[in-house]
Image: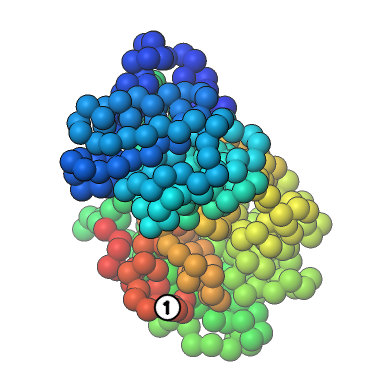
Amino acid sequence: MIPVVTPVRMAEIDAAAPEPVDVLIERAAAAVARAAVEMMGGRYGRRVVVLAGPGNNGADGRAAARRLRRDGVRVRVVSVADAPETLPPADLYIDAAFGTGLSRPHAPPQRGRLDAPVLAVDIPSGLDGLTGEVLGEPVWAAQRTVTFAALKPGLLFGKGPAVCGATTVADIGLAVGDADGDACALFTDADVEALPAGTGATHKWDGAALVVAGSPGMGGAASLACSAALRSGARMVHLCSPAAAGTAWPVEVVRSEPPLAVDADRFKVCAAGPGLGTDDQAAARLAAALALNLPTVVDADGLRLLRDPAVAAVIGRRRGSSSPLVLTPHDGEFEALMSARPGPDRIAAAKHAAARFDAVVLLKGGPTMVADADGRIRIVSSGDARLATAGTGDVLTGMIAGRMAAFGPERLIDRVAETAHLHGRAASAIRGPRLVASDLLAALPTVTP
């Protein structure tokens, strides 16, 4: 996983650096100069304009300019304080105006050659380092950003991905420790764990998942969740859903009618909510599922029922138990849970919900946030906007249940982030401008180790 460090924490790391600031600036400048040469495809005859601010970000840009000049590049450094309305033409513009500490609007000058690429130093100037919101005027959209020591949330959230281009992290010797990576990190392909193969003694009940889902006319959600659980690690799936839900269940699934009557000790996990409905009967079904005290994933209609008095009472009794709870809201469902939408600081929003419900909370979006009650954060940037279609959340619910059935509840925040990452990777494996939820089921074997 790649550490993600807030601007406040980055300032603390900077202040605690064991080496002089001048040394760190030269290391940062070397990384910026290398990136500039790569972007221009060479040095000889190339023209670069550096827009430099008054702080360390500007110092990085000026030091990079000196390095480029020594290598034969024609460089002009323009101070933000007295920049003309339009900068001279160049083959590359280096944005070293302001870093992650900027808290006011920044209006950059016009570039004399709009088709020339932009290289941003640490973060595009004018982009909020925490939220990815643009502060005032539009920022220069960079084709590449060289950031230092760790990723910053603003590079990943809001407008960040659109204006940062390809982002690389340069190690300049700052002490970003294991604790920082554990506190907040971006999940990557390298962090995905292969499903356990089992042994000759493995039995289907060793990884059984219970799914409580479906209601009249809403059987498709239950079916998608069950299929995803089977394809993601569950060795057996038992679905409790009324026949009136009206769909064809996967042939591998055992189905029973409500009310719920199962031996909880035989299951590793429960998934509840897809297509469940939101009436009193649905609330009673959810309360019964939660009362089994299994590790439980709650999604969709189930999230809107957590405020029901009977359901809330069971949630209260589960608090602090050894059976974890996973909640997977999108922004609208988050509002139903928390009485407010997440807002621009999605890290804080996810942490707040996780603490309130003593749960692992997966806040869907671009990117997806996963938080636990201890305040740890995992960020998942795989996938794309095509996942905003009916049924994909039901697939994600089943996938989480399937992997929990296979691995158990240990390292749960990482397990949930891993599942969200695979969900996004499955979407990326599907070609075309649109996808439907069942496409993900077919793609899962191609992305699951």
Q: Is residue 154 left or right of residue 421?
A: right
- What residue type is disc 1 on? Pro
Classify residue 64 by image quadrant.
top left
Front-lying residue, 66 or 402 = 66
Q: Residue at x 40, y 83 (%)?
A: 251
Residue at the image position 51 percent from the left and 23 percent from the top: 55
Coordinates of residue 155 in the picture (x, y in percent): 48, 44
Q: Position of residue 443 (x, y in %)?
A: 33, 72
Q: Quadrant of residue 149?
A: top left
User: Which residue is at the front of the view, 434 or 281?
Assistant: 434
Would residue 419 be found to the left or right of residue 243 on screen?
Answer: left
Residue carrying label 1: 433
Residue plotted at (67% across, 68% down): 301
Which quadrant does the C terminus fall into? bottom left
Q: Position of residue 347 (x, y in %)?
A: 59, 42
Circle 1 residues within 10 Å: few <14, some 14–19, many ≥20: few
Image spot of residue 380 (x, y percent): 45, 51
Q: In the rendered image, is residue 201 in sight?
A: no
Question: What secondary structure is found at the residue carrying circle 1?
Answer: loop
